[in-house]
Image (cartoon, grey):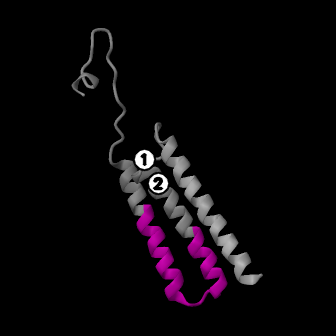
């Protein structure tokens, strides 16, 4: 493990370090999305069906932010994790559709 961090002659590899700027911005954005979800529900002025659409949209946006910034899915080397998550989404979506058809058949 120590050999990965030492520089050999002629090889000066530098690793890019992201600072806290992206983390702070994404945290503020996540808090803002959460506040918008609460405000949408608490207001009671918006149609119930439209409230569901807004909440689902905010939740999907929140998931993408969490995965990209906090789970580092935007970085290289996370292909299998992304494939696993997409397969899980596909299986859940298929089960929900099958349950709907079964309930309404």
| Foreground residue among 23 and 55 | 55
Q: Is residue 44 left or right of residue 20?
A: right
**Residue 16 appears in which quarter of the rendering?**
top left
x then y, percent, for residue 57: 59, 68
Q: CA distance from mark 1 to mark 2?
A: 6 Å
The verdict on residue 51 being magenta is yes
x then y, percent, for residue 24: 36, 55
The residue wearing badge 1 is 72
The residue wearing badge 2 is 67
Which of the marked residues, 1 or 2, is nearer the chain's N terminus? 2
Give the residue at the far top of this rendering. 10
Q: Main secondary structure of the magenta part?
A: helix
Secondary structure state at the residue bearing disc 2: helix
x then y, percent, for residue 49: 66, 83
Number of numbered discs on residues: 2
Q: Which residues are magenta?
A: 29-57
x then y, percent, for residue 61: 54, 62
């Amino acid at each position: 493990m120590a050999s990965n961090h030492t520089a050999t002659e002629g090889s000066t590899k530098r690793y890019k370090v992201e600072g806290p700027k992206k983390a702070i911005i994404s945290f503020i954005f996540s808090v803002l999305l959460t506040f918008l979800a609460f405000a949408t529900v608490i207001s009671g002025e918006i149609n119930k069906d439209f409230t569901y659409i807004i909440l689902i949209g905010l939740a999907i946006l929140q998931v993408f932010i969490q995965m990209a910034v906090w789970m580092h899915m935007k970085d290289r080397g996370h292909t299998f994790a992304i494939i696993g998550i997409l397969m899980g989404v596909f299986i859940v979506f298929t089960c929900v559709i099958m349950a709907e058809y079964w309930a309404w058949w």
